[in-house]
Amino acid sequence: MADPSSQESRVSHDPKLAGRRAQADGGAQVEGGQVASRETFEGVLTGRRLEQGDPPWRWLELGDLTEKPEDFGAEFVWVDEEYVYLQDE
């Protein structure tokens, strides 16, 4: 399988997800690059979806972050769809 970062990306919008509160597990590389840690994000789904690679990796965009790693400065994050947990269900 080819490196997903070298594959074409497709961004779409899913109005059914926009505005829904969600929590997501994510990963972060630990200093030195040999190990990773689990990180938690919580916020509101924007409705944007990203598909990348073959087979496709599916990502959802999370914004208005109320929980994020201490050193995470971005306002939005792409999270793996498989690890997104809707808070309003």
Image: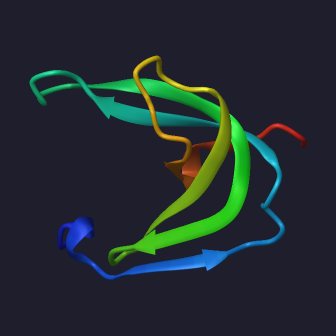
> Residue at coordinates 58% horizontally, 32% vertically from top-left?
41
> Residue at coordinates 59% horizontally, 55% vertically from top-left?
61
Is 41 on the left or on the right of 3, as rendered?
Answer: right
Q: Position of residue 81 (x, y in %)?
A: 57, 55
> Residue at coordinates 39% horizontally, 34% vertically from top-left?
27
**Above or below: residue 59 compared with residue 71:** below
The quadrant in which the N terminus is found is bottom left
Q: Position of residue 52 (x, y in %)?
A: 39, 72
Q: Quadrant of residue 66?
A: top right
Q: Quadrant of residue 48?
A: bottom right
Is 17 on the left or on the right of 55, as rendered?
Answer: right
Q: Residue furthest right?
A: 89
Is 80 on the left or on the right of 89, as rendered?
Answer: left
The quadrant in which the C terminus is found is top right
Q: How many marks?
A: 0
Nearest the eye: 70 or 10: 70
Q: Residue furthest top?
A: 70
Q: Position of residue 11 (x, y in %)?
A: 53, 77
**Above or below: residue 78 compared with residue 67:** below
> Residue at coordinates 84% horizontally, 67% vertically from top-left?
16
The colouring scheme, among rainbow, by chain, secondary structure or one colour, is: rainbow
Nearest the eye: 63 or 10: 63
